[in-house]
Structure formats: C-alpha cells, structure tokens
Amino acid sequence: MIALPEPGPLVMPLGEALLSRRSRYRYEPVGLSALGSLLGWAVGVQRRVDGHVLGMNPTAGGLPSLAVHVVRDGEVLEYSREEHALRLVGTGVLEGVFTQPEFESRASTVVVLSGLLGPGLEKYGEVHQSTVRLDGGIALQNLYLVGTALGLRCCAVAGFDVVRVRELVGGEGDPLALFVVG
Ligand SMILES: Cc1cc2nc3c(=O)[nH]c(=O)nc-3n(C[C@H](O)[C@H](O)[C@H](O)COP(=O)(O)O)c2cc1C
C-alpha cells in the first residue's frame, strides 16, 4: 500500500479554474504529493454519514459506482479513497491503450475511471447503465478542475482500447474514461 500525502490547499478560485481549464497534450511526471492532492480533492472522501462514505464527486444514491486506477511507471495502482492510498494491483505499460499515438509517447501518469454497475443496478435497474456514465463524467470534471487548480496539465481521453484497458486494470468494472495528467 502506498499512503498518499494529504491533499494540500486548493487556492485557485473556482471561476479562474473554470476559465483557465484546457485539454493539454504535453506532460511532466507527477509526484506523489500532487497525485495525493489531485485524487483527494477530485475523488476522495468528503464525509461519512451513518457509516456511508460520500465522495468529493457525487454519485447516484451516493453509491460506490466508480473504480479509480492510476497507471504510472509501469505499475497499475488502485486508489482507495477511504485509505487515501494506492494499492499495487498489477504491472503494465500504456502500449496499445490509446487511439492517438501521441498519448502513448507523452503520457506518464494516467487515471482510469471504471464504472461499477453492481450496487446501482440493484437500486435503479437498467437506467443505471447510463447513470454510471454520468458519475464518471462528474469525476472527470472534478479531475480537470482540481488538476487545473494544482497547475497540472490534463486531458480526458475517450479514444482508448477498452479491452486493453480492462486487461490493464484487472477486469474490474467497465472502463469509462482515461485522464492523462502531468
Ligand atoms: C469525455 C471526453 C473525452 C475526450 N477524449 C479525447 C480524446 O480521446 N482525445 C483528445 O485528443 N481529446 C479528448 N478530449 C478533449 C477534448 O477534445 C477537449 O476537451 C475539447 O476539444 C475542448 O477543449 P478544452 O478541453 O481545452 O476546452 C476529451 C474530452 C472529454 C470531455
């Protein structure tokens, strides 16, 4: 388990983050401190209510509908928001993941958002197939805005090989989006 540093302060006003957010295509390596701030603010725990954990990113019914993995330095790490830590779940490279080859050569840190249908399907039925994608979109925008406030370059990526990404993150969930950061 790799404990992440507690998130540092986010000082950029929301209006400035919304206005200056861009998709950017050149990246630097991301240290653990920046990664801790990014994940903690964007998809970490916000509060606990009656034993339920609720995230910085709202999800339908407050259910745990997303798995968050980080691929960096040849390692695949699962983010545990409750422990604010990364757990090594595998190894793998980004080869063959992206439709656009420039991401493969430039990206060093990639966040993978996967949908977990189970809990929501039980509560909401079929509509949860699309709701889980909304949950993923909200998390993606949090990542963009927090990344911007932290001075990181970011890009959401929909062009990826879903089979390859599923293999990379160990088959858990349905890969929804990648987020390249640095
Ligand atoms: C869900 C989503 C998926 C995206 N997928 C890709 C992608 O696969 N490749 C890419 O170059 N940009 C991708 N982008 C970035 C968009 O092209 C970009 O957000 C858009 O052109 C507007 O630019 P901006 O983000 O700088 O405002 C994606 C953005 C979103 C929100």
Image (cartoon, rainbow, N blue to C red):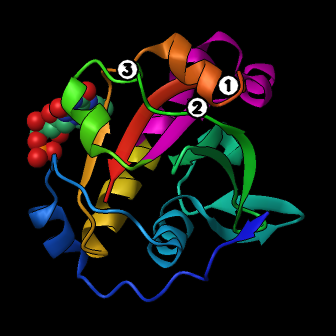
Callout 2 crowding tier (Cα within 10 Å): few <14, some 14–19, many ≥20: many
Viewer-side residue, 71 vs 92? 92
- Residue 148: numbered disc: none
Q: Residue furthest right?
A: 51
Residue 170, compared with residue 4, is above or below; it is: above
Q: Is residue 153 left or right of residue 129?
A: left
Q: Which residue is mark 2?
A: 114
Is residue 155 within the magenta segment?
no
Residue at the image position 78 percent from the left and 26 percent from the top:
123
Which dot, 3 or 2, sits closer to the camera?
A: 3
Estimate the x, y position of residue 93 in percent, counting from the top left: 50, 33
The magenta segment is: 110-137
Which quarter of the figure has residue 107?
Answer: top left
Magenta span: chief secondary structure: helix
Residue 48 figure quarter: bottom right
The amino acid pointed to by label 1 is: Gly
Q: Secondary structure at mark 3?
A: loop
Residue wearing tag 1 = 173
Residue 114 lies in the magenta stretch: yes
Which residue is identified by label 3?
Answer: 160
Could you say where residue 180 lies in the image, as x and y percent from the top left? 34, 46
Residue toward you, 90 or 165: 90
User: Label 3 CB, ligand 1: below 8 Å?
Assistant: yes
User: Which amino acid type is shown beneath numbered disc 2?
Assistant: Ser
Q: Secondary structure at mark 1?
A: loop
Task: Using the image, determine if residue 140 lies above or below residue 100.
Answer: below
Task: Describe the element under mark 2 as helix, strand or loop.
Answer: strand
Quadrant where the image shows the C terminus: bottom left
